[in-house]
Image (spheres, grey):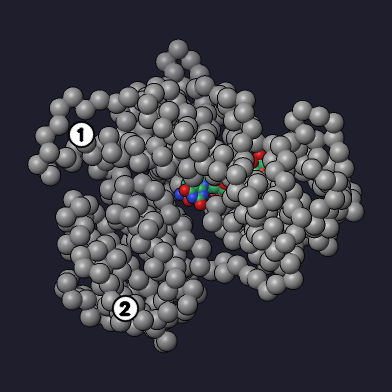
C-alpha cells in the first residue's frame, strides 16, 4: 500500500468494490478497505451480498427448489424417481464453494484493475484522511483526495428476541444451518422471510411466519401480492398477518414465540427462530466525530441525489444511504460516484430500480404500483396476462402467476410492470430497459418476442393494456 491515493473506498461490498474498479478504470490510484470476516475466521471481499446475502441465498434457493421438484414435479414430466434424499452437508458445501469462488474473484478483479485491496478497518478522519487499521498490524494514516463510504448494513435486532447465534438467529446464521429445523419460525414476511422460509420449507421444515402488517407484501402491487400469497399458502407456508411479536424465549421445547393477533395474545413453539424485520445502516466507528459527516435519525449517512456528503470529496453509497437496500442500487451508485470524481456526468435513475423476490414463483417489479398511481391522481390503464395461457410456461410446468403492465392514459408511457411467475427476475430486465428508454406500451406491443418464450407474457400484457391481447380473452 501507499500512503496517498486519489480515491479510498471503505467497504468492498457490491457498492464499494464496483466504485473502486470504476475509479481505477478512470486511471485513478485507488485503495479499497474491507474488514469482513467469515465464520471460518477468514477475511473476504464482497460484503453482505457475496458472503451472507444475495449469493448464498440464491444458491440454497436453487438447490432446495430442485430437491422439491424432484420429489413433487418430476412425476408429471414422466420421470420416475425413487429414494430422492437430501444431503444437506453437500448442499451447504456447494453454497460455501460458490461464495468462496466469487469472493476470491473480487480479490482477483481488484488486483487486475490495480486497486490496492486492504484488509482491515477504515475510518474517515477530518481533512479527508483515512485511518487504516490492518488485521495484523499498526494503524496507518492515508491521505485521500476523495473518499467513498460504502459500509453497508446489518440486521435489525429486536430487544425482546435478541440473537443468540443458535436458537434465535439472523439471516446469515439461517443460511448456514447444518440441520433442517423441524419447526422454523420467522419474524417478518418481507424479502428475507419469504426467501429463507421457502428454502427451509422445501427442505422439510414446518414454517410459520409472523408479519406485523395486515397487507401481505405491502410494498408490492396488490394484484401481484394477492396471487403470490395464494401460492405460498398452497405451498404450506403459514403466514400470520397483522401478528406482532411480543417476545421470544428459549426453553426445553425450543423457542417459545409470543405474539399478538388483533390484540389477542398467542404463542407457538419452534426449534429455530429467524428474525428478519429489516436491516439498518452500519456505520460503527466509520467516521471520526470531527469528520463533518452527518447521519439522519435512522442512522443513514446524509447524501444528495449524487451521493455527495456535506464534506467536499466524500461520497457515500449503497445500503448505508437512503433508498432501497439492494446490491444493484449500490453498484450503480458506486459507478456514479466514481464517474463524478473523474469529472464526468453521471446519475442514477432511482425511479427505475428493479425489485426481485426469488421465491417460486418469483416476484419482480419496476416502477409504480397501481395503488401508488391511483394515489397520485394520474389517469392510467392496465393490462395483464396469466402464465396459464403461455405455451412456454405450460411446457415448463410453471403456469402460476401473471404479468401486469400499467401505463399512463394520456401518453401511453409505461409507469410500472409487475410480475409473479417463472423467471420473473430475468423477465423484469425487459421492462427495466423499456422504462429506462421511457417506452410506451405501443413500443412493447410492436417489439417482436420469440415464440415460445416467457417474455411473450410481457408482450401480451402490453397488448392487453389496449384490449388487444391475442392469446387471452380481453376484459
Ligand atoms: P455490504 O454488502 O454490506 O458491504 C459493506 C462492506 O463494508 C462489508 O464487507 C463490511 O465488512 C465493510 N465495512 C463496513 N464498515 C467498514 C469499515 N469501517 N472498515 C472496513 N470495512 C468496513 N440484494 C439484492 O439486490 N438481491 C438479492 O438477491 C439480495 N439478497 C439478499 C439476501 C440476504 C439474506 C441479505 C441479508 C441481503 C440481500 N440483499 C440482496 C441485499 C444486499 O446484500 C445489500 O443490498 C448489499 O450487499 C449492499 O451492498 P453494500 O456494498 O452497500 O454493503
Ligand atoms: P423487509 O423490510 O423486506 O421485511 C421486514 C418485514 O418484517 C416487514 O414486512 C415488516 O412489516 C416486518 N416486521 C417488522 N417488525 C416486525 C415485528 N416486530 N413483528 C412482525 N413483523 C415485523 O426486511 P428483510 O426481509 O429483513 O430484508 C432486509 C433487506 O435486505 C431488504 O431491504 C431487502 O431489500 C434486502 N434483501 C433483498 C433481497 C432481494 O433483493 N431478493 C433478498 C433479501 C434481502
SS for tag 2? loop
Report the image quarter containing ligand 1. top right
- In the rendered structure, the answer to whether residue 166 lies left or right of residue 138 reads left
Residue 283 against residue 355 in the figure, above or below: above
- Chain-order first, disc 1 or disc 2: 1
User: With respect to residue 191, does 448 lie above or below?
Assistant: below
In the figure, residue 317 lies in which quadrant?
bottom right
| Residue in the picture at 35% in, 71% down | 405
Q: Residue 187, can we see it?
A: no
Ligand 1 within 8 A of label 2's CB? no
Q: How would you rate the neighbour count of disc 1 (Cα within 10 Å): few for under 14, some for 14-19, many for 20 or more?
A: some
How far apart are the two marked residues, 1 and 2, measured between alpha carbons?
A: 39 Å
The percent position of residue 449, horizontal first and vertical second, equals: 27, 72
Quadrant of the snapshot with the C terminus: bottom left
Q: Can you tell which mark lies on residue 71?
A: 1
Identify the disc placed on residue 447: 2
Instruction: Classify mark 1: helix, strand or loop.
Output: helix
Examine the image and state in which quarter residue 205 appears.
top left
Amino acid at each position: 500500500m501507499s500512503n496517498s491515493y486519489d480515491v479510498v473506498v471503505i467497504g468492498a461490498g457490491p457498492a464499494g468494490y464496483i466504485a473502486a474498479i470504476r475509479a481505477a478504470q478512470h486511471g485513478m490510484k485507488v485503495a479499497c478497505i474491507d474488514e469482513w470476516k467469515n465464520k471460518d475466521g477468514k477475511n473476504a471481499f464482497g460484503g453482505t451480498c457475496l458472503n451472507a446475502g444475495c449469493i448464498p441465498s440464491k444458491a440454497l434457493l436453487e438447490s432446495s427448489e430442485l430437491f422439491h421438484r424432484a420429489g413433487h414435479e418430476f412425476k408429471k414430466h414422466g420421470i420416475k424417481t425413487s429414494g430422492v434424499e437430501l444431503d444437506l452437508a453437500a448442499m451447504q458445501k456447494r453454497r460455501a464453494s460458490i461464495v468462496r469462488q466469487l469472493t476470491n474473484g473480487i480479490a482477483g478483479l481488484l488486483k487486475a484493475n490495480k486497486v490496492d485491496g486492504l484488509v482491515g478497518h477504515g475510518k474517515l478522519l477530518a481533512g479527508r484522511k483515512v485511518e487504516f487499521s490492518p488485521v495484523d498490524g499498526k494503524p496507518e494514516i492515508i491521505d485521500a483526495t476523495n473518499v467513498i463510504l460504502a459500509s453497508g448494513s446489518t440486521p435489525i435486532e429486536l430487544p425482546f428476541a435478541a440473537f443468540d447465534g443458535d436458537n434465535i438467529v439472523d439471516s446469515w446464521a439461517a443460511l448456514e444451518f447444518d440441520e433442517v429445523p423441524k419447526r422454523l419460525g420467522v419474524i417478518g414476511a418481507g424479502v428475507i422471510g419469504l426467501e429463507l422460509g421457502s428454502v427451509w420449507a422445501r427442505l422439510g421444515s414446518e414454517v410459520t411466519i409472523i408479519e406485523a402488517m395486515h397487507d401481505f407484501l405491502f410494498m408490492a402491487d396488490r394484484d401481484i401480492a394477492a396471487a403470490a400469497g395464494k401460492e405460498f399458502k398452497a405451498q404450506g407456508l403459514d403466514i400470520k398477518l397483522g401478528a406482532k411479536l411480543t417476545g421470544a424465549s428459549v426453553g426445553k421445547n425450543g423457542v417459545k414465540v409470543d405474539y399478538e393477533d388483533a390484540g389477542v395474545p398467542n404463542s407457538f413453539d419452534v426449534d429455530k427462530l429467524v428474525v428478519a424485520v429489516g436491516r439498518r445502516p452500519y456505520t460503527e466507528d466509520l467516521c471520526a466525530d470531527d469528520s463533518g459527516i452527518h447521519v439522519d435519525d435512522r442512522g443513514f449517512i446524509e447524501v444528495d441525489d449524487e451521493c455527495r456528503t456535506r464534506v467536499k470529496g466524500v461520497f457515500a453509497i449503497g445500503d448505508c444511504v437512503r433508498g432501497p437496500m439492494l446490491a444493484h442500487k449500490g453498484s450503480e451508485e458506486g459507478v456514479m460516484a466514481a464517474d463524478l470524481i473523474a469529472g464526468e456526468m453521471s446519475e442514477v435513475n432511482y425511479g427505475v430500480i428493479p425489485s426481485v423476490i426469488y421465491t417460486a414463483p418469483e416476484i419482480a417489479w419496476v416502477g409504480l404500483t397501481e395503488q401508488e398511481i391511483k394515489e397520485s391522481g394520474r389517469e392510467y390503464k392496465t393490462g395483464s396476462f396469466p402464465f396459464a395461457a403461455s405455451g412456454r410456461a405450460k411446457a415448463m410446468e410453471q403456469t402460476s402467476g401473471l404479468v401486469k403492465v400499467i401505463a399512463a392514459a394520456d401518453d401511453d408511457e409505461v409507469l410500472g410492470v409487475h410480475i409473479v411467475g417463472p423467471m420473473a427476475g430475468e423477465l423484469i430486465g425487459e421492462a427495466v430497459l423499456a422504462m429506462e428508454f421511457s417506452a410506451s406500451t405501443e413500443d412493447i406491443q410492436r417489439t417482436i418476442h420469440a415464440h415460445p418464450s416467457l417474455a411473450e407474457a410481457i408482450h401480451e400484457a402490453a397488448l392487453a393494456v389496449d384490449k388487444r391481447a391475442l392469446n387471452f380473452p380481453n376484459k
